[in-house]
Image: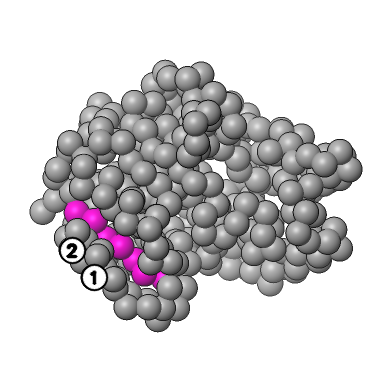
Amino acid sequence: MPKVTIAIATLAWDDSLSVCLASLQAQTYRDFEVIVIDNSGNSGDAQVHQTGATVISNPRNVGFGSAMNQAFRQSTAPYFATLNDDTVADPEWLSVLVRAMEQRPEIGMCAPRIQLAGPDTLLDSAGMLVCPDGSSRQRGHLQPAARYNRSEEILFPSGCAALYRREMLQEIGLFDEDFFLYCEDTDLGLRARWAAWECVYAPEAVVEHRYSHSAGRASPLKAYYVERNRLFVAVKNFPSAALWLVPWYAGERYLWHLWYALRGQGAAAAYRESNSGFDLLKYVLRAHLALVKHWPQLWRKRKTIRRRLTSRQFRALLRRYSVSPRQVAAL
């Protein structure tokens, strides 16, 4: 039985996946297996099989969360790693993550230092932060990676590259497959923190990432699912005292999006380069209609979350690792 299962979901059998798998073959830590989940609807590629990876072929795109759950159920390793197909892992990546995880049994999640591909050595993620409206953003995004060189406790890791303890996942549940795309890691991370599992950041575990290779940095697909799923996150995980404030903070974020869009900055401006502002409004309305449709189901899931923290302790945790509506709009 390998000690680590590395799960990689893919929508395209291209060079990016080959490079990612080659970086895993170069790992100094060798006690692991690789499972590639093919969501492209095509059969497994011979080059992937040559790497020794197990391939799960789906007839259609079942989403990130479902793909990760498929790999988890097929494995028995005590540690479960998620990795995007457009990443390149440093040879010491897995070794550092496992070593950090084994410091204490209370550590259920570990985040590496995810850097953006390119010569500037800018950070993609040093863990995640949560806005009071339910949005989540990468900690340290677009800042020099050297600023985040200290190991410390963080809220939870980005699903782009993360290591999870199997015991934790068996206790709190796996990725919520209703999210389909985006924010599954936020939901999972918050459920883990409710159950008092800890997360550490291991800066010496380095991964290079080509940002939003699969769905695009500012695509209509991403706009809809990010907006819908931040609502799902809040309804499922926020304490009642924080949940009532979500519309207020969302309204503030919308105003900042408008402000930055007029100045040609931020995510809204990037979206308008190839889409209309009316389309963006349409996706926001559609996301809220989806919330109404799924509200009963989300509320049932909310009641099943294992809670070892009090609501006050959880709110303090959210405040400690928060990002403002303006910061979300500016990214």
Q: Is residue 38 visible?
A: yes
Residue 50 badge: 2
* SS at mark 1 in the image: helix
Vertical placement of 55 versus 100: above or below? below
Left or right, residue 2 beside residue 19: left
Residue 253 badge: none
Report the colour scheme. Answer: one colour
| Residue range (magenta) | 33-39
Residue 304 coordinates in the image, percent (x, y): 48, 57
Residue 187 coordinates in the image, percent (x, y): 52, 51
The residue identified by callout 1 is 46
Relative to the observer, which residue lies in front, 82 or 218? 218
Residue 266 coordinates in the image, percent (x, y): 75, 41
Quick one: quadrant of the C terminus? Answer: top right
Relative to the observer, which residue lies in front, 90 or 247? 90
Relative to the observer, which residue lies in front, 134 or 212? 212
Vertical placement of 147 versus 33: above or below? above
Left or right, residue 23 beside residue 258: left
- How crowded is the residue under tag 2: few (<14 C-alpha within 10 Å), some, or many (20+)? few
Residue 251 coordinates in the image, percent (x, y): 83, 46
* SS at mark 2 in the image: helix
Q: Was residue 35 drawn as part of the magenta stretch in this picture? A: yes
Residue 100 location, quadrant: top left
- Between the residue at mark 1 and the residue at mark 2, the CA separation in whole angstroms equals 6 Å
Residue type at tag 1: Ala
Q: Are marks 1 and 2 in contact (CB under 8 Å)?
A: yes
> Which SS type dominates the magenta stretch?
strand
Quick one: quadrant of the N terminus? Answer: bottom left
Question: Residue sitting at 61 percent across and 43 percent down?
Answer: 136
